[in-house]
Amino acid sequence: MSHIPVLMVPVLKTFRKRTVTTFFDGTLGLGGHAAALLGQHPELQTYIGVDKDERALAIAIAATTVNDTTTLNTRRGCYGDVTPTLQRDALLGSPARLSGALLDLGVSSLQLDDGARGFSHSRYGALDMRMDDSLGMTAADVVQTYSEAALVRVLGLYGDVRKPRRLARSLVAARGAAPLRTTTQLVAALERHLPREPKGRRRELAKVFQSLRIAVNAELEVLRGALPPLAALLERGGALAVISFHSGEDRIVKHTFAELAAGSGGELLVATKRPVVADEAEREANPRSRSAKLRVLERRS
C-alpha cells in the first residue's frame, strides 16, 4: 500500500518559520504529514492526532517517531467532535492554545484501497463508505432510503455530477427492483446514464461515489462547524492549514476564513489570497493531488 501525503512541501513551508509547540492534526490518516512536521519542529511539545479510522490510527502510531520532549496524543474520532474538548485539555495548558493545526480532508489511500469498505467504484465491496465503520448510516442506507429529491441534492451538491436528476431517478428505479447493497450493483444501476468514453465514465463514477461518501460522513457540516473553534484556539503567530479536494469543501474554507478574518479586528489574517495547488511534478507523481487546494488562516504575531 503506497501513501503519498498531498501538498507536503507547501504544508511544511506554512509552518517552517514558526515556533510550533502545540499542534492539532485533525485528520491524521497514515501519519505522513505528522512525521514530516515532527521532524521539522524539534521544539514540538504536544502533537495531537485525530482520525475516525481505527486502522489508519494504528498505522500512524506505529509509523510516527517522537523525541524525548514531545508527547504524541492520538484519539479515535471526528475532528469536529474533538475540537471543543481541546479548550479544556490540560495538554494545551491554560488557557488552551495551538501553535498550528492541519486538516487534510477527503478519503485516504487506505480507505480507497480496501474494496470491502465500498469507497472505490473500481473495486467490489459492500456499500459502506463510513470512515468510522462503527457508527452511523452506510452508503447503502442512503441509496435505499433517500427520496429522489434528496438523492438529486446529494449528487448535485456533493458530487457536481452532470445529470443528477437522471442518476437519482435511475437509482430509485433500480432499488425498486432489487436492493442496492454493493459497489457493482450501484455501478450497474447507473450504467445507462454514464459517458461511454472510459475516462469520462470513470470520472463520473468517482463523483457519484464521492457524493455518497460526503453524505454518509456529513463531511461538509463537520468542516463548517470545526473551523471557527480551531481558529479561536490559535496563539499569536499560529496558523490553521486546510487541504480540500472538493469545490464544496473549498468554498466553505474560503468563505469561513474570510468571515473569521473580517470579524477579528485584524487579529486573524488569510495568508493565502489564492489557494496553493500542487506543482506539475507532484501532479505527475501523485494524481490525487490534482484537485488539492491548501488555504491558510493565521493569527497576527
Image (spheres, rainbow, N blue to C red):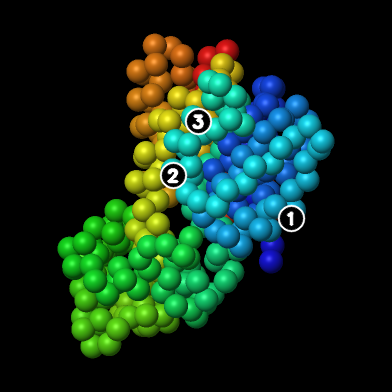
Disc 1 packing (10 Å; few <14; some 14–19; many ≥20): few
- At x 29%, y 53%, the residue is 157
- Quadrant assignment, res 172: bottom left
- Quadrant assignment, res 130: bottom left
Residue 122 at x, y = what percent? 50, 75
Residue 215 at x, y = what percent? 34, 58
- At x 62%, y 46%, the residue is 74
Residue 25 at x, y = what percent? 58, 41
* Front: mark 3 or 1: 3
Q: Amino acid at mark 1?
A: Ala
The secondary element bearing badge 1 is classed as: helix
Closer-to-camera residue (37/172)? 37
212 sits left or right of 62 in the view: left
113 sits left or right of 275 in the view: right
Is residue 216 positioned above or below 8 on the image?
below
- From the image, tell me which residue sits under label 2: 81
- From the image, tell me which residue sits under label 3: 88
Disc 3/disc 1 C-alpha distance (Å): 27 Å
Is residue 193 positioned above or below 20 on the image?
below
**Mark 2 or 1 closer to N-term?**
1
Residues tagged 2 and 1 counted as in contact (Cβ below 8 A): no
Q: Amino acid at mark 2?
A: Asp
The secondary element bearing badge 2 is classed as: helix
Disc 2/disc 1 C-alpha distance (Å): 24 Å
- At x 24%, y 64%, the residue is 151
Q: Which mark is residue 62?
A: 1
Disc 3 packing (10 Å; few <14; some 14–19; many ≥20): few
Disc 2 packing (10 Å; few <14; some 14–19; many ≥20): few
Quadrant including the N terminus: bottom right
> Among all residues in the image, which is located at the extreme bottom?
177
19 sits left or right of 75 in the view: right
Residue 264 seen in render:
yes
